[in-house]
Image: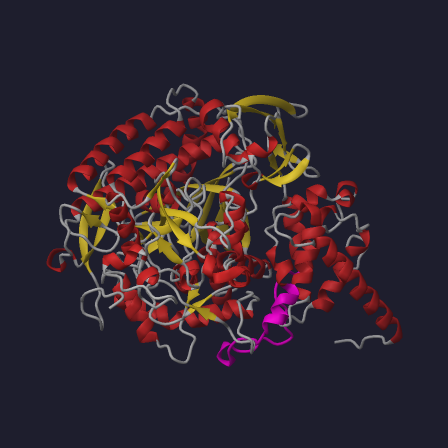
Amino acid sequence: MADEITLEVARFRPGEDTEPVLQSYQVPLREQWAVLDGLSYIKDHLDGTLSFRWSCRMGICGSCGMTVNGDPQLSCATFLTDYAPGPIRIEPLHNFPVIRDLVVDIGDFMDKLPTVKPWLVRDVHSPLEEGEYLQTPEELEDYQQYSMCINCMLCYSACPVYALDQDFVGPAAIALAQRYNLDSRDEGADERLAVLSSPEGIWSCTFVGECSAACPKGVDPAGAIQRYKLTAATQAIKGLLMPRSRR
Amino acid sequence: MTTFHDVVVIGGGGAGLRAAIAVAETNPALRVAVVSKVYPMRSHTVSAEGGAAAVAADDDSLDEHAYDTVSGSDWLCDQDAVEAFVAEAPRELLRLEHWGCPWSRQPDGRIAVRAFGGMKKKRTWFAADRTGFHLLHTLFQTALSYSDIVRYDEWYVTKILVDDGRAYGVVAIELATGRIETITASTVIVCTGGCGRVYPFTTNANIKTGDGMALAYRAGAALKDMEFVQYHPTGLPFTGILITEATRAEGGWLLNKDGYRYLQDYDLGTPSPTPVLRSMELGPRDRLSQAFVHEVEKGRTTDTPYGPVVHLDLRHLGAKLIDAKLPFVRELCTNYQNIDPVKELVPVRPVVHYMMGGIHTDIRGATSLEGLYAAGEVACVSINGANRLGSNSLPECLVFGTRAGRAAAVFAGRYRTAVPEAVLAQGRDEERRLSGELARRAEGHERIADIRTEMQTTMENGAGIYRDGDSLAKAEHELAELRLRYQHAAIDDHSTNFNTELIAWLELGFMLDVAESIIACALRREESRGAHQRTDFPARDDDRFLAHSLVRRQPDGTGRVTYLPVTITRWPPGERVYGR
């Protein structure tokens, strides 16, 4: 194995650069080193001006999403040796405005997330004195997969629909809406229907499935969207046949 | 620029979000803001794995949870705080359930609990082995439903503003733009978590640089029990990734290089095939990490490029149990160690995990500075004393986050006064200082990473699992030299947009404060208790040191240490007994 590997890192400094430029760095090629370790080596030893986000280094905080050789990846869970002999091209996540170097602006997602009400909605909240809302392991299993979203934005980066239409609510937000819709304790599905069944909701999705392929946590947002389309269609038909009374 | 809120919470993890919600619920008229250097769902609470302790089962009692916590703390906790904690923890975890937390369940739909280290009963609620992740996302998503909670995401606090002994807000930098703002408030709650990054090998995320401890220390608040740093016995070599204690609660064994369950040699009980509570692998973390050091000394560990290791054996648990209850452990071992715990031994070694000490608070979360509150790992109430029990920290974030939020809300409602001009002037001074640093640091010649690495090495060598007077004095001297070099650190990045080098420099300054306070307290505590093991004073000394260390920053920057008696309500100091 060679001692070093080349990282070609996209640099973008607002005010200085009009578009991203690739800058090459040589970093040690070591067993167990993630792409993120290579970037930290650059920051610590070669070039302190390189900016990127990272925190937990164990694939759970969702900070360090980047585009590695064209694919959206968590840089802490993507290893240098898998790309040897290199070079490895590291760019910011696609489909987001770039703030600086590898740092993208996820404000759009943060604004959209509350619109799908990703919290437990109850008509009446029982007092704590009555104990827990019962939920069997099977009921938990129904939504558990969708509760695994770490908000890393890899799915938005991979989504061809979001690339063309930034109004699309997007895979992670829809998966999180489904996470609550499928939770046996939740009663908010009707409230979420308006947003999800809007033109910017599930119907934008053309079921390419890139989101599920990109997800590092096995969430399967594409499956969530397809499953929800069925629910929404059924609801729509029910709505035609049996108009809902006003609350 | 200046903006005003009634309550400013620094940090958006478990304690911070819980505090913010408590403020909103206590007094909806108050304007509450959460200022965090990362998006809240990135906070380090996300990494907690094993679970959250609160009495739930019929065979359990609050007294037993309290006794386990008190004895686990080597009697250094405050027992009034522990009694409040164990009494309120079940309700807080239940509230999380009502907010949607996907707790693991029994077949009948009730909450499931598992065993944990140092606990005599099964009382640890869990969401598989991603408890912190689910707890944090539940809190974050629930907080989204409180549209009045204002968030400053990716804003870095550099200073707590103080006038006449009272906190009045903060100065913070917006990372994306470099904009510096004075955010004034009637009260400030510090919830920034721990400081594991002052050590070289830690489970702690990159963001855990002790910011809140240093901010409060500089503002004049006392820090407490800083010498008590917890080493978790099972981290993956090289990465330091945590392998949860739940692996041992589910039946995992710790083996030395001879395949021998070595904990039986350290007064932790006798081996049995299935886990026995408060025994062997389910002993407390301080004792297990100390046993590892002795195994190294006996030559019974395995050498690796990343230091000596022992092995965690989960093979006998089988794929089914591991996938159901420890799926994240399997994922972490596979991704980061290239090992499948279903079939292979997992190499592990002790790793810096948790700070028992922190900002001195009372039982309501109030610090020694008026208007300043703290909760979570950044604070020291103290329920953890000299050694925290696994799964007590998540409920601590909730119980004391709530308490601090309520107390701060009451204070803010009562003492809503105009911000003094002196505070605004301080804010302007801080804004000028920060703007000036970028220009000034261009002349520097020391690399930030070099100073940071040397500080970490100093701390490991000087104040590790075992310390003595000489190692601590040497560390004190080295930190003083690093402090001088810090003044000459270079910032090559002159951009105002997402300047992570500037943040790294500010974080390093905070870490040096925290490191110095750890050494100052450790040097003066001439006894061994819990996680503070002095080889030159190997015995616990209740006559002299059944007391909290309090360290306050002096005008010359050094720390002055005094002592505060421990509060004992019902459990007089006794021997810590495990496995017998």
Q: Main secondary structure of the magenta part?
A: loop
Q: Residue at x 45, y 35 (%)?
A: B503
User: Considering only vertical position in the picture, is B258 above or below A116?
Assistant: above
Which residues are the magenta region?
A117-143
Is A138 contained in the magenta span?
yes
Residue B224, position as x, y percentages in the image: 26, 52
Q: Is residue B315 left or right of A214 when viewed as pictured?
A: left
Quadrant that contains the C terminus of chain B? bottom left
User: Considering only vertical position in the picture, is A169 above or below B108?
Assistant: above
User: Considering only vertical position in the picture, is B364 above or below B257?
Assistant: below
Is any atom of residue A12 visible in this view? no
Residue A114, position as x, y percentages in the image: 65, 56
In the figure, residue A229 lies in which quadrant?
A: bottom right
**Relative depth, front residue between B182 and A65:** A65
Is B399 contained in the magenta span?
no
Q: Residue at x 55, y 63 (%)?
A: B320
**Relative depth, front residue between B536 and B522:** B536
In the figure, residue A239 lies in which quadrant?
A: bottom right
Q: Residue at x 79, y 47 (%)?
A: A208
Is any atom of residue A137 visible in this view? yes
Residue B527, position as x, y percentages in the image: 15, 52
Q: How many marks?
A: 0
